[in-house]
Amino acid sequence: MTDINRQLILGIETSCDETAAAIVAGGRIILSSVVASQIDLHSEYGGVVPEIASREHVKSILPVIDRALKDADKALGDLDAIAVTYGPGLVGALLVGVSAAKGLAAATGLPLVPLHHLEGHIASAYLADQTLEPPFLCLIVSGGHATLAEVSDYTTFRVLGRTRDDAPGEAFDKIARTIGLGYPGGPLIEQAAQGGNREAFPLPMTRFPDSFDFSFSGVKTAAINQYRKLMQQADREGSKWPTCCSEKDFAATFQEAIVRTLVSHTADALKDTGYRSLVLGGGVSANQRLREAMSVMAEEQGIRLTVPSLVHCTDNAAMIGAAGYYAWKSGRRAGLDLNADPMAELDELASFYENRDQNDEN
Ligand code: KG4
Ligand code: ZN
């Protein structure tokens, strides 16, 4: 049993449009988790505006950290380490969290632990199932990522496939914007898809030979072209949507195309690698249809599936506090020269260890 008064990590996350801080004990127990979302500010632009995101992070970061400490009834002196997302993400946004973490580490003498954003999404599964341990295969799907990776232990990752163009969340956001639903698109498409026909028109599924890489630009473009055709038909019929395909049919068919690709890739990767445990994470993993289809596949193949609770699918700092605990225990450290890295890679964390060979992570 984890002693909740020990091994306390402050997690800080500012890689995109959420300013978040959390206190997590022993990598598993959330004492507090504060997320200041900027969604309302960005929604009028139909997507995240980097300059606005940075400015909002600057405004919110100290009050959010303060709130996280107060909610947990802890002081900085009670902490064991400060974990911060240093990449990937928007550079101006990441810099705010990294600077705050460095300032706190300098002032308190606490260890500074750099975290890859996707490690956080993976660790959100540790918060959902206290008994989950590596090794497992993970699929992280968000606004910026579609990444299939092997997690051989808490801090060792090998990327098997990633998107070569758009991320699934990005495709959801673009399609939602195209059909006038707003931002963020994922939840709005999911809502619009309720009760719709999932096979209203054909959409392509991209696969690369000998690779688990993803591509979503083809399906996105095909859906946009289909939408234009449907709107012409609707014009002729004098209605908002044509009788052959309503808004809910369109949303359900698009959603299903994304889900089908994600499930089929993951099923193949499980067969190929032999893993019996699968973790799903990232904003798009909040999608109920994806969760349902993935759990049917997992059940058929006898795979243990762990999905984060809905609040921990999208960006938060509890996941950084959880991942931060394991990174801290493994000896990962950064100096006060830590910089934000918008292109950070999940399998290139070796430079943060004093005695870890780069090859250890490959
Ligand atoms: O993980 P996240 O909060 O931020 C990134 O690291 O990108 O993911 C945000 C993305 C957005 O593109 C949003 O549209 C998508 O996750 N998303 C969803 C759902 N909820 C959020 N996509 C599909 N269905 C959802 N229910
Ligand atoms: Zn994320």
Image: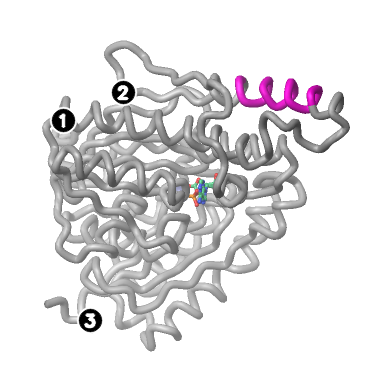
Inspect the image, locate mark 1, and give the three-letter code of the amino acid beneath it: Asn
Tell me, yes or no, if residue 86 can be seen here.
Answer: no
Q: Which is closer to the viewer, label 2 or label 3?
A: 2
> Could you tell me which secondary element the residue under label 1 belongs to?
helix
Pointers 1 and 3 in contact (CB under 8 A)?
no
Per the model, the C-alpha gap separating discs 2 and 1 is: 22 Å
Drawn side of residue 359 relative to residue 219, left or right = left
* Magenta-colored stretch includes residue 133: no
Drawn side of residue 269 relative to residue 113, left or right = left
Question: Picture coordinates of residue 358 (x, y %)?
Answer: 19, 33
- Label 1 belongs to which residue? 359
- In primary-sequence order, the first of circles 2 and 3 is 3
Question: Picture coordinates of residue 101 (x, y %)?
Answer: 43, 63
> Could you tell me which secondary element the residue under label 2 belongs to?
loop
User: For the magenta stretch, what is the residue range?
Assistant: 222-233
- Label 3 belongs to which residue? 4
> Could you tell me which secondary element the residue under label 3 belongs to?
loop
**75 vs 2: above or below:** below
Query: Magenta stretch mostly in which secondary structure?
Result: helix
**217 vs 125: above or below:** above
Inspect the image, locate mark 3, and give the three-letter code of the amino acid beneath it: Ile
Tell me, yes or no, if residue 289 can be seen here.
Answer: yes
Q: Count residues near mark 1 (Cα–Cα under 10 Å), then give few for <14, some for 14-19, many for 20+.
A: few
- Label 2 belongs to which residue? 212
The foreground one among 137 and 322 is 137
Question: Picture coordinates of residue 345 (x, y %)?
Answer: 36, 35
Numbered badge on residue 154: none
The foreground one among 269 and 253 is 253
